[in-house]
Amino acid sequence: MTLELTRSGRGSRPIVVGAIGLVLFLIAGLGSYAVARADRAQDTKYCGHDCIPGIRIGTVVEALQGQGHTCADKRQFWSCELKVGKVRFEADLFRVPNVADFYEYIGKVEARIVNPDSTTAAAGLDYMSWFAALPHRDDPSTVKKVHGWLAEQITGDGDITFVLGWEYALEREANTRSVELTMKRRH
């Protein structure tokens, strides 16, 4: 048996396919949200609300090393650095105090770009944005808000903001274009 679409049936096919795709996307999204939410709730029981839930410090260190960073464990924090010419991308990932070593979580992040030039400006914003999004990675509207604030501050003088229990501070080093982003839980 052969099924042939008539001219009028062809126009509705993309709508039906689009509707099915949208429904599948929403179902998948809700499932992913539920799983992420459950993981986040489970992870916060180990460090309360003092950490970036759902991400162990080792996961972030491995991601940075995968991008060429050299990292060292300094006991209270991990320090990672990547040099590109005269520009340095640095990150310090501070452990949450009073948490068993078996569960290592991040309580504070300091990310720096030292000696940025015009060719690394976009990379610098991307670098800072990646860290800034970590606590809110499963909330696209909050990530967008944080990225917008960050973009404004990098082109300005820097500032402090608070987003859903997190304090973000962007500072410029005197007489340089170097910038530092500090993010930590607000108590």
Image (cartoon, rainbow, N blue to C red):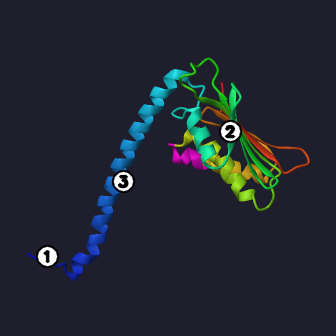
**Of helix, strand and loop, which mostly describes the magenta segment?**
helix
Which residue in the structure is indicated by mark 1?
Answer: 3
How far across and how far down the image is residue 72, in percent?
A: 69, 34
Cα separation between marks 2 and 3: 38 Å
How far across and how far down the image is residue 25, in percent?
A: 36, 53
Q: Which residues are magenta?
A: 138-144
Cα separation between marks 3 and 1: 28 Å
Left-right relation of 136 to 19: right
Q: Secondary structure beneath disc 2?
A: strand
Amino acid type at circle 2 is Cys
First in residue order: circle 2 vs circle 3: 3
First in residue order: circle 3 vs circle 1: 1
Amino acid type at circle 3 is Phe
Which residue in the structure is indicated by mark 3?
Answer: 25
Q: Contact, CB < 8 Å: mark 1 with mark 2?
A: no
Q: Secondary structure beneath disc 1?
A: loop
Which residue in the structure is indicated by mark 2?
Answer: 71
- Looking at this view, is 87 or 33 the one in front? 87
Q: Quadrant of the N terminus?
A: bottom left
In reply to whether residue 56 is colored magenta, the answer given is no
The residue that appears at 37% across and 44% down in the rendered structure is: 30
- Looking at this view, is 77 or 186 the one in front? 77
In reply to whether residue 141 is colored magenta, the answer given is yes
Q: Contact, CB < 8 Å: mark 3 with mark 1?
A: no
The residue that appears at 68% across and 47% down in the rendered structure is: 128
First in residue order: circle 1 vs circle 2: 1
Amino acid type at circle 1 is Leu
- Looking at this view, is 97 or 4 the one in front? 97
